[in-house]
Amino acid sequence: MHYVIGDVHGCLQPLIRLLQREGFIGEGLEWTGGQAQLWFLGDYTDRGPNGIGVIELLMRLELEAAAAGGAVHALLGNHDLMLLAAQHFTEVEIPSFKRQGQSLTFYEIWRWVGGKARDFECLSEAHIEWLQNRPALALVGDTLLMHADSLFYLEYGENLAQINRNLADILRSDRVEAWDVLAEQFTDRFSFLSGGRALTEEFLQQLGAARLVHGHTPIYSLMGCAPQEVFHPLEYNEGLCFNVDHCLWKRGPGFVLALPESSYSVQGHT
């Protein structure tokens, strides 16, 4: 089976409780999920207290799950991009802000969106390498996995492989303008809610999928309820879209989405 978990945002202890509750890890935080395939949709740091702890847990579980015949996969989120930008261009002024007469560095904007100084101080080359290797999109059977509920991905390619390759190239480049543009695009949201079923079907058809699962936009903010009342994904557009942002950082209980078993060939993840 394939399972999906939404935004973690540095909430290591709530993530541990969720993984233990669902049977993926044991009391010693060891992998106990057997052959399960567990997918994370990005935003591992910021807002919560221990983003580096989350990254290190996922890095270790990747190895342990693979040894047990399972897998832990992790996609790229906008906060992961922002942390990398803060590290790579720490004191560089953001070009788009500079053109508007504002002086703001990549590090400053990362702190403004919830970046924690402790994560920055503990960020190692191994963590950076791991984050740079996160693909933006994955196709599990006919289900498209992505972080943001946005169309911006199509600005970077006509298919999943092109999009992943072009975004990966930016993460390993010194093209500050490209980083700036991508960071701004990655904040976009609501594309499928506002565009409705027709736009969603067109997007899915281009990427060879029948449905999509995303995080990025907290469910509670769309439902008008408290984060503590979110126990399930938000399904919309007649079953084409599933939002899994359970907002752990605002003390949501968290949940895991099991994907349909129709077909489990995986594209877009290495």
Image (cartoon, rainbow, N blue to C red):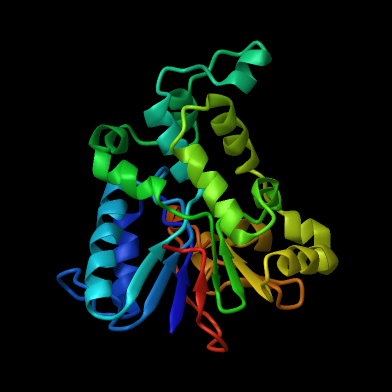
Q: Position of residue 219 (x, y in %)?
A: 60, 62
Identify the residue at image location x=59%, y=19%: 95
Q: Position of residue 25 (x, y in %)?
A: 25, 74
Q: Quadrant of the C terminus?
A: bottom left
**Identity of the residue furthest to the bottom in this view:** 262
Q: Is residue 256 among what the camera can see?
A: no
Q: Is residue 241 among what the camera can see?
A: yes
Q: Position of residue 83 (x, y in %)?
A: 41, 37
**Identity of the residue furthest to the top in this view:** 101
Instruction: Give the left or right position of residue 251, taking residue 71 as reference.
Output: right
Identify the residue at image location x=32%, y=72%: 19
Identify the residue at image location x=36%, y=81%: 36
Identify the residue at image location x=53%, y=80%: 259
Q: Which quarter of the picture shows residue 139?
A: bottom right
Q: Position of residue 154 (x, y in %)?
A: 69, 51
Compared with 233, 107 (above or below) is above
* Residue nearest the viewer, comparing 222 with 109: 109
Instruction: Give the left or right position of residue 157, taking residue 34 as reference.
Output: right
Q: Quadrant of the N terminus?
A: bottom left
* Residue nearest the viewer, comparing 23 with 181: 181
Compared with 180, 245 (above or below) is below
